[in-house]
Image (cartoon, rainbow, N blue to C red):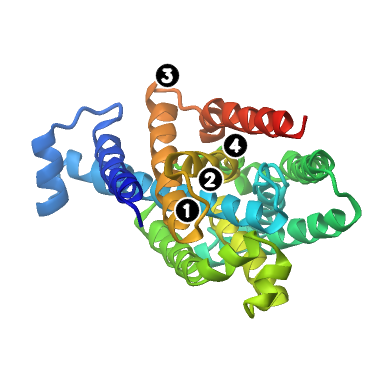
Amino acid sequence: MNKRCVIMMALLFVLTGAAFAVNLFAGSADISADEILRGVFNGGADAAVNILWKIRIPRALAALILGGALALSGYLLQTFFHNPIAGPFVLGVSSGAKLTVAMVMIAAAGRFGQVTSGAMIGAAFIGSMLSLGFILIISQKVRGISMLVVCGVMIGYICSAVTDFMVTFADEGDIVNLHSWSMGSFSGMSMDNVRAAAIAVFAGLICTMLLSKPIGAYRLGEAYAKSLGVNIKLLRAAIITLSGLLAACVTAFAGPVSFVGIAVPHIARVIFKTSKPALLIPACFLGGGIFCMICDMIARTVFSPTELSISTVTAIFGAPVVVAVMLARRRGEM
């Protein structure tokens, strides 16, 4: 690891801590630094401590963990398809997960009350894998990047349309929290949600790090990877499973969040000036967490007390990155 990469990785850790700290201060209720330090380290039962531990800390942790998961999922999908604009939102993976989670929430709400975190992750994983299955079939038929993206967008629209149809005819009591969730939001997160998400996401992160060497060989071509003894079929199955799991965790707890999975991996490549997975995997995770924490802070403070959906803010900052990547690729082809 060269000096530049060490400095940039250290900077990402510093920015992660800074973004987390700023999220603890930001909000409609003014809490001083002394109250935050006392609340974090000593606890208590006053209003400031309740706001910290029941609202701001779980929400900031969720943005950090789920934002990192989304960016890492995007990196894996870009690696799998050898496509610079592949991502869970663009390819319809998030919409597929959104559909199955909405089905479970509507079906189970009347019978069992609140749906468990495990059930939501499981439902989202099934939906994401179904969407990825369709994309894999389509990718065998079309070779152009633009056609693959168009097909992914169409799958996303179909899943979103079916979800909206179900929500329209569901009982009001079954969809109390479904509308805000379906637009994408980190609000309403609890520490139990954070713990469940952390277990699944960090398991996916560790498995992805263990695959960094095979992924590096795979990026240089399947023939080269095979010559190094990499089991291509097993690796492709692992990549697609991990990307589906990470995207599912995000959708299960925060709903569909746009453009993070595409934009952050490209930003990481530009900053580190390398394509080594051992560096890009942690960089994407930290970068995704920073990106989502900043966007979530903007979403809940700029027009307070009105809160924007997280996808609205991530699209504003993420879409220009995608456009720049497409223009740069087009110039390279001309």
The residue under label 2 is which amino acid type?
Answer: Pro
**Residue 44 in the image: x percent, y percent?**
12, 50
**Camera-side mark, 2 or 4:** 2
For the residues labelled 2 and 4, the Cα–Cα distance comes to 23 Å
Which residue matches tag 4?
Answer: 183
Residue nearest the viewer, comparing 289 with 107: 289
Examine the rendering and report whether any part of residue 91 can be seen. Answer: yes
Which residue matches tag 1?
Answer: 280
The residue under label 3 is which amino acid type?
Answer: Phe
Residue found farthest to the right: 141
**Camera-side mark, 3 or 1:** 1
Res 265 label: 2
For the residues labelled 3 and 2, the Cα–Cα distance comes to 29 Å
Whether pointer 3 and pointer 2 mark residues with C-beta atoms closer than 8 Å, the reply is no
Left or right for 253, reference 239: left
Left or right for 3, reference 100: left
Which residue matches tag 3?
Answer: 303
Tell me the element at label 2: helix
**Residue 149 in the image: x percent, y percent?**
77, 41
Residue nearest the viewer, comparing 35 with 247: 247
**Camera-side mark, 3 or 2:** 2
Q: Which of marks 3 and 1 is nearer the N terminus?
A: 1
**Residue 214 in the image: x percent, y percent?**
58, 70
